[in-house]
Image (spheres, helix red, strand yellow):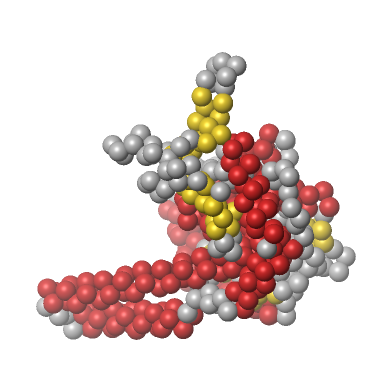
């Protein structure tokens, strides 16, 4: 006699029930003649799984006895009774699942926040049941945000944390880029919570998908203590979008990366090392396409000291008029049109109409077949129209995100100027907060474009 147990495992499907699967394999191998189980619902709550497994066992002459229902599967009436009882068990699972889902959504609607604490860095469950900050872990989160805003990429931050032997939220040794990106974009670190980002599609398979409007979402502000101040969080989101638009052009080698632009070709400057093996070793910056386009760019190369000195001159010119600039930034934010949401909604509604026309066409063809040439032509026409509308909506959404990002930078830039006096030394932090980009001209002039749109030529 042997025991096969799956302690605490749901029986809605058998895929992850190691004990159950091991028992079936042993039975099919001839090691078991009779399986005794408490009830049909303990065997499996999925009708298909129950019947499929029982039939496999019957073919090998293995009997299953269900104590509660007093059913022997080799009995002539066994399969009918199992079908009935399994269906009832499956409906019981459905009812339980729906009740649990209702309870979870009711908590969300009431603004009650719960986190997966065992895999969530920075918080633990407090005595009141709400998230509570873990000081040591919160410092890691702040380090991630601070490093990102000082130019580091998520990949570089992940490597740094791995090198420092700091465990991941899940307790692993190696950090991944995706984990860092998840932390950088999770609104819960600013003390708010977007609830029901995903939902369970099927209670049997437990399959989940990203919520794209199929079920309600709830956004709760100030639901728990913030690790990252909201204004800093929003600035990180804006920087994250900026780098995403740059794509592979951005890296974390230097604070000057993707910020120095060649007047000749519009490409970015990159760092090069001269005399790398001698005492005359120097790091210079020059156009990445200087010798690649057939026609040589005539913009000069720059030493980092030169860039820093010119920034100090440009920044001090800005600071001489900082009160006026701050006022202009605030006025700009009041009249800033982030996007035409009405246009996005109109395109979305038109997409819904085209989708409905497509469904009707498919249904019409299935009920009363059309000439397939005409059907395919009409179908392609609708699909092209849908894709065109989707591209238009994506462009509008992208424009909205870019404008919202720009506004965040402008407001943060104004706040930076408010507490800043004239500078005598280069500041990496000030460079990152103030500069959008610098255009390097053929004659050596440098045009500094600041976050508010101000230009200073040095």
Point out the image quarter for the N terminus.
Answer: top right
Q: Residue at x 63, y 72 (%)?
A: 328
Q: Quadrant of residue 352?
A: bottom left
- Residue 129 relative to residue 11: left or right: right
Q: Position of residue 126 (x, y in %)?
A: 85, 63
Residue placed most toward the observer, 339 or 44: 339
In percent of width and height, residue 64 lies at 56, 58
Residue 36 falls in which quadrant of the image? bottom right
Name the outermost residue toward the right.
127
The residue depicted at 52 percent of the width and 27 percent of the height is 273
Residue 182 drawn above or below residue 374: above
> Which image quadrant is residue 159 in?
top right
Task: Give the side of residue 311 with respect to residue 373, left or right.
Answer: right
Measured as percent of width and height from the top left, residue 250 is found at 51, 46
Tally of marks: 0
Nearest the eye: 248 or 168: 248
Q: Residue at x 35, y 34 (%)?
A: 291
């Amino acid at each position: 006699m042997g025991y096969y147990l799956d302690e605490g495992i749901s029986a809605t499907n058998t895929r992850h029930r190691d004990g159950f699967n091991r028992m079936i394999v042993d039975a099919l191998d001839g090691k078991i003649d009779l399986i005794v189980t408490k009830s049909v619902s303990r065997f499996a709550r999925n009708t298909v799984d129950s019947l499929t497994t029982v039939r496999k066992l019957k073919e090998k002459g293995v009997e299953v006895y269900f104590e509660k229902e007093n059913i022997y599967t080799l009995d002539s009436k066994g399969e009918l009774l199992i079908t009935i009882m399994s269906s009832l068990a499956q409906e019981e699972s459905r009812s339980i699942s729906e009740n649990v889902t209702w309870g979870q959504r009711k908590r969300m609607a009431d603004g009650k926040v719960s986190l997966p604490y065992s895999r969530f860095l920075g918080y633990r469950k407090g005595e009141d049941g709400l998230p509570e900050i873990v000081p040591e872990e919160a410092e890691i989160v702040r380090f991630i945000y601070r490093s990102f805003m000082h130019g580091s990429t998520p990949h570089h931050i992940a490597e740094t944390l791995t090198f420092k032997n700091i465990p991941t939220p899940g307790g692993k040794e190696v950090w991944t880029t995706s984990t860092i990106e998840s932390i950088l974009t999770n609104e819960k670190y600013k003390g708010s919570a977007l609830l029901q980002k995903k939902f369970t599609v099927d209670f049997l398979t437990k399959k989940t998908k990203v919520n794209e409007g199929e079920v309600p979402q709830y956004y709760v502000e100030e639901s728990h203590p913030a690790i990252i101040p909201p204004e800093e969080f929003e600035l990180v989101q804006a920087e994250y979008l900026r780098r995403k638009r740059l794509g592979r052009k951005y890296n974390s080698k230097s604070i000057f990366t993707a910020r120095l632009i060649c007047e000749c070709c519009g490409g970015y400057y990159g760092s090069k090392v001269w005399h790398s093996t001698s005492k005359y070793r120097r790091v210079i910056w020059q156009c990445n396409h200087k010798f690649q386009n057939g026609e040589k760019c005539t913009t000069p190369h720059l030493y980092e000291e030169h860039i820093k000195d010119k920034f100090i001159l440009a920044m001090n010119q800005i600071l001489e008029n900082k009160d006026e600039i701050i006022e202009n930034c605030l006025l700009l934010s009041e009249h800033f049109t982030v996007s035409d949401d009405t246009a996005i909604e109109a395109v979305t509604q038109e997409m819904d109409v085209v989708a409905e026309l497509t469904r009707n066409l498919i249904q019409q063809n299935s009920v009363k077949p059309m000439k397939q040439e005409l059907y395919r032509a009409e179908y392609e026409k609708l699909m092209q129209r849908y894709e065109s509308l989707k591209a238009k909506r994506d462009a509008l959404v992208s424009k909205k995100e870019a404008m919202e990002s720009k506004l965040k930078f402008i407001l943060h830039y104004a706040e930076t100027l408010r507490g800043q006096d004239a500078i005598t030394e280069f500041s990496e932090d000030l460079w990152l907060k103030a500069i959008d980009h610098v255009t390097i001209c053929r004659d050596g002039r440098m045009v500094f474009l600041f976050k508010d749109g101000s230009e200073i030529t040095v």
